[in-house]
Amino acid sequence: MHPLSMVQMAKAIKFLVVCFLLCHVTEAVSQDSLVISDDKLVIHDILISGNKITHESVILRELIFSPGDTVFKMQLIPSLQRSRENLLNLSIFNFVFLNVKHLGDNVIDVTVEVTERWYIWPIPILEYADRNFSTFLENRDWDKINYGAWLKWNNFRGRNELLTAKIRLGYVKEYALAYSKPNLGKNQRHGISAGFNVNQQNEVYISTQNNQPVEYEPLDIPAQVRLNTSFKYTYRRKYYASHFLRLDYYDYQVSDSVAIVNSNYLGGGSTRQNFFLLTYQFNYDVRDSRVYPLEGYNVRFKAEQYGLGLIPDFDSPTFRLTGILMYHQKIVNRLYFYNATKARFSTEKVLPHFLNKGLGYNENLRGYEPYVIDGSDYVISMYNLKVQVVKPNSYTIPFIGMEQFNKIHYAVYVNLFADFGYVNNDFPNPTNTMVNTWQFSAGAGIDMITYYDKVLSIYYAINRYGEHGFFFQLETPFARW
């Protein structure tokens, strides 16, 4: 092309860009000039009911409007819906309803009616201690049962604080105490939390062979004792973006025989490893629900530094970066799509066994429940197409008098899915053939959602090796991500 023609083309493109911008500015100005008082509503007051325990300030914090605000009529319903979702995502209410009272002259009151949950849970612990429910059903190892008591006090003092205490006995012994306060300061933008945890195991996953964890119970029990203390600061300026800064101290101790059987369990043949862990996390969450989202997205970044140059410290300081993207979209009525992708990168590729966990622990490829894939870096991506068979509905149980329990909500979804994952391991055990290779699975299932944030998933999956079967989950999806 002739150089002059290129110059003329560049000028033409600039001219089109300028015209495009001018058109948008003109359109915005013209639309603003057409706005009249009848298109606006003034919020006179916000009236809250049903909050027998919860302070009004906690509820007002989640509303995207305040008394005295002016809103456009076309924005009123989306604002009410978004505020309702914000309140439900606190997980301290079973039901939330927002309505409008017209007072005349384009002035309105907004009413907020909440049904509070039951907040004090002295829960007896009787649970399986395997990596997932499907593995427990397959192995039926009844020695892997935990029992004990767990006190969980949600919405402590009515300020959305959380107080937990736990005594777990059996296969895993655990003693824990934690407290969090999310709404500090005049504008409730700051939060703090602290916790203490002691964990004792007589059996550990000492290595991975043939793509499965190898369990080891030494004679000189306990096999492992782990102590963890933590402090976390949270900053949440408005509604959807949160920043977390957390400092942990870990102290791992294992028996002599664990260090002999696998000298890399804690690294270097040592029987003790203690270190500081500094974590920064950014979370931007605009999903309609954190329990079972149908629309919206969630972006998270986490940076972790193992070892801070202090005494005691980690023998091999390691930096890790983790990114998460969850995207949920309504396609047509009752048909939804989501993708959840997570990736992790570590600067150190030679890690102690207890830090070298990839897939099969907190993150699973469906159809790979019996397996674990160890490595320093990994990526997992899950795709799901789901049909709403039973719309979200509620039912009142007549013979239960307490409103925290007598009204339940439920919904049912049928879904098709495909999962992909890859784990990088620079020095794998030759028997672990699933590392450094793309793994994938597909299948179909059904999700049943009920109150108190529980989802029962039953699905049929087949992996890349042709292995297939039915699997079960009872948890909040992606809660551990």
Image (tube, rainbow, N blue to C red):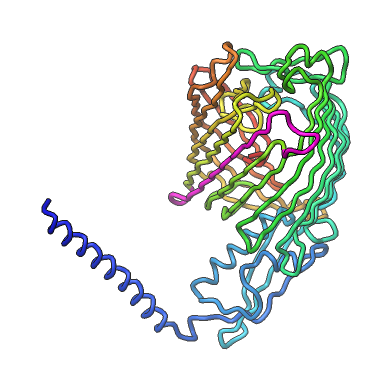
Instruction: Decide which of 56, 433 is in the foreground and name it.
Output: 433
Whether 169 is drawn above or below 450: the answer is above
Residue 254 visible at all = yes
Q: Quadrant of residue 13?
A: bottom left
Residue 126 visible at all = no
**Residue sitting at 68 percent across and 33 percent down?**
317
**Residue sitting at 63 percent across and 64 percent down?**
238
Q: Quadrant of residue 77?
A: bottom right
Residue 315 inside the magenta-drawn segment:
yes
Whether 25 is drawn above or below 317: the answer is below
Residue 99 inside the magenta-drawn segment:
no
- The quarter in which the C terminus is drawn is top right
Q: Is residue 312 left or right of residue 390?
A: right
Q: Quadrant of residue 12?
A: bottom left
**Residue sitting at 68 percent across and 44 percent down?**
279
Of all residues shown, which one is farthest toward the bottom? 105
- Coordinates of residue 338 in the picture (x, y in percent): 50, 43
Q: Is residue 166 left or right of residue 281?
A: right
Residue range of the region highlighted in magenta in the rendering: 308-334
**Residue sitting at 59 percent across and 26 percent down?**
349
- Coordinates of residue 131 in the picture (x, y in percent): 70, 26
- Coordinates of residue 43 in the picture (x, y in percent): 62, 79
> Total number of numbered labels?
0
Instruction: Decide which of 103, 174 is in the foreground and name it.
Output: 174
- Coordinates of residue 41 in the picture (x, y in percent): 55, 80
